[in-house]
């Protein structure tokens, strides 16, 4: 049995849940999300909480017990508070700007990179920080990862796009090897 799967999901005020066959519709102050449910799980609403239970005890089903509960809990959290990730752009001459819905990145290439986010994801630019926010945790993480993919932080000077608080392990260059020996 999963310890995470057993935990009930508390529903904050203003969040409604509609349980249908094969999916759950979670509606809150920030919007609505649909979570697909796997076969073999029962989802019941008891007053202000949701409980996920297994229909039968099986090893195959137990693997997904905690996952199913976490996906529903993430949807409840998303429609209540939303999710955001902050990316830092570091490097001399690296710039970021927002033109309408397009994110324009100057990352030392011969051309600027333009990125258009999906419609339910919001992008903000503050100095050289990009803030990706939305109600779907998976989409926010996916958009942040695809923006970071344009110029990952390199280990010699640390230039590139990194998550806020990410540690980039630095390497010594060629000259350090010559003086050490």
Image (tube, rainbow, N blue to C red):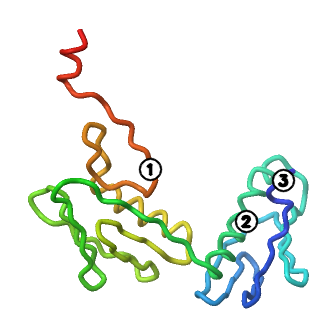
Q: Which residue is the extreme one toward the left?
A: 110
Measured along the vertical axis of the image, is residue 62 above or below residue 82? above
Which residue occupies 23% across, 18% down?
Answer: 177
Gap in angstroms between the C-alphas marked 2 and 3: 18 Å
How many dots with numbers?
A: 3
> In screen coordinates, is 111 left or right of 141?
left
Position of residue 75 measured from the top left corner of the image (x, y, whole percent): 65, 74
Q: Disc 2 vs disc 3: Cβ atoms closer than 8 Å?
A: no
> Tag 2: Cα neighbours inside 10 Å, few (<14), some, or many (≥20)?
some
User: In this view of the protein, which residue sits in the foreground, 92 or 82?
Assistant: 92
Sequence order check, earlier mark of 2 and 3? 3
Kindly identify which residue carries mark 2: 38
User: In this view of the protein, which residue sits in the foreground, 64 or 26?
Assistant: 26
Q: Quadrant of residue 105?
A: bottom left
Q: Mark 2, mark 3: which one is toward the viewer?
A: 3
Gap in angstroms between the C-alphas marked 1 and 2: 34 Å
Sequence order check, earlier mark of 1 and 2? 2
Labelled disc at residue 166? 1
> In screen coordinates, is 21 left or right of 130?
right
> In screen coordinates, is 58 left or right of 160?
right
Which residue occupies 83% across, 73% down?
Answer: 43
Q: Quadrant of residue 61?
A: bottom right
Kindly identify which residue carries mark 3: 3
Label 3 SS? helix
Position of residue 107 measured from the top left corner of the image (x, y, whole percent): 19, 58
Gap in angstroms between the C-alphas marked 1 and 3: 30 Å
Position of residue 90 measured from the top left corner of the image (x, y, whole percent): 28, 55
> Tag 1: Cα neighbours inside 10 Å, few (<14), some, or many (≥20)?
few
Q: Mark 1, mark 2: which one is toward the viewer?
A: 1
Sequence order check, earlier mark of 1 and 3? 3
């Amino acid at each position: 049995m999963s310890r995470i799967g057993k935990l009930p999901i508390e529903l904050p005020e203003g969040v409604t849940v509609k349980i249908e066959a094969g999916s759950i519709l979670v509606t809150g102050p920030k919007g609505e999300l649909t979570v697909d449910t796997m076969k073999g799980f029962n989802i019941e609403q008891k007053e202000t909480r949701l409980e996920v239970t297994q229909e039968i005890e099986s090893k195959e089903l137990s693997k997904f017990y905690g996952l199913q509960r976490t996906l529903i809990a993430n949807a409840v959290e998303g429609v209540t508070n939303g999710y955001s990730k902050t990316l830092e752009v570091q490097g001399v001459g690296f710039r970021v700007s927002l033109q309408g819905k397009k994110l324009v990145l100057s990352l030392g290439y011969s051309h600027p990179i333009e990125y258009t986010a999906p419609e339910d994801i919001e992008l903000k630019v503050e100095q050289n920080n990009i803030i990706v926010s939305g109600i779907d945790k998976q989409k926010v993480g996916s958009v942040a990862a695809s923006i970071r993919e344009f110029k990952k932080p390199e280990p010699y000077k640390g230039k590139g796009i990194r998550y806020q608080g990410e540690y980039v392990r630095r390497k010594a260059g060629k000259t350090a090897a010559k003086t050490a020996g």
